[in-house]
Image (cartoon, helix red, strand yellow):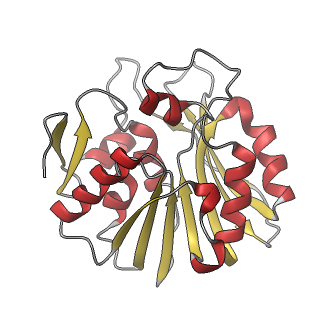
Amino acid sequence: MLKESENLEILGKVNKKILQKREGFHFSTDPILLANFIEISKNIKIADLGTGSAIMPLLLADNENIDEIYGFEIQEEIADMATRTIELNDLESKIKIYNIDINEIEATKNKVDLIITNPPYMKLEDGKISSNLEKAISRHEVKLKLSQLIKKASEMLNKKGSFNIIFRTERLEELLEILKINKLYTKRIRFIYSKKGKTSKLFMLEAKKNIKNTLQIEETLYIYNQNNSYTNEVLKYYE
């Protein structure tokens, strides 16, 4: 199952194997944070829009409240790698990987209760686009714009479904406007800081479909201590 261009790594926290590219895009801390942000009720189906190496489905696989997890990935080679990762962990009955453009998902046939997504953060006009196609698609809106992602997510969610995203703080206002247009109303926001004394670069947000909520701003999440070691909270996500 392991190709020459890949490494096999172990996710110690959940005792799962994951295939990663030696060169190219590698999962970061972001999906790990988001997987620990979501609130899971019983007997739900989850969709991971832009699943990449399927890191979030792997982290959630042992949760008995989750019936099924569907990972959607546009890049054929990455989707194939994610599929082989799921097979390595004998999780085919719980996690399904689909190689498809998110814009082409048939929402009526793929209804879910909760959506997670760690989408490209940057617009095409912002910053230098990587010459590595995998990295470019993961970081810039080469294949998927934010408005397209939110529209599809709203279509896929069941009534009162939950939409969860980790995204750039500088685009928060834009995100809130697009969510409201698609009848997704923000319930919780948690701002992420690299360490104390810095400005927030990222945030996590939960919105509910068709339910207008009283917005909650949750406790700040710091990733690093002043000595650049992980904070106790983040360490718990790894160990």
Number of numbered discs visible in the structure rendering: 0
What residue sits 77% from the left and 63% below the top?
A: 184
Residue 53 lies, with reference to residue 213, above or below; the image says: above
Q: Position of residue 162 (x, y in %)?
A: 63, 68
Residue 65 lies, with reference to residue 152, above or below; the image says: below
Q: Position of residue 129 (x, y in %)?
A: 56, 20
- Report whether 185 appears left or right of 194: right
Asked whether residue 42 appears in the rendered view, the answer is no
Among the 4 quarters of the image, the one containing residue 62:
bottom left
Asked whether residue 89 appears in the rendered view, the answer is yes
What residue sits 45% from the left and 29% below the top?
A: 133
- Report whether 31 appears left or right of 64: right
Judge by depth and name the residue closer to the eye, 194 or 35: 35
What residue sits 61% from the left and 40% below the top?
A: 167
Judge by depth and name the residue closer to the eye, 115 or 96: 96
Among the 4 quarters of the image, the one containing residue 6:
top left
Q: Position of residue 219 (x, y in %)?
A: 59, 45
Among the 4 quarters of the image, the one containing residue 213:
bottom right
Q: Position of residue 202 (x, y in %)?
A: 59, 34
Outermost residue to the bottom: 43
Judge by depth and name the residue closer to the eye, 223 or 147: 147
What residue sits 50% from the left and 55% below the top?
A: 37
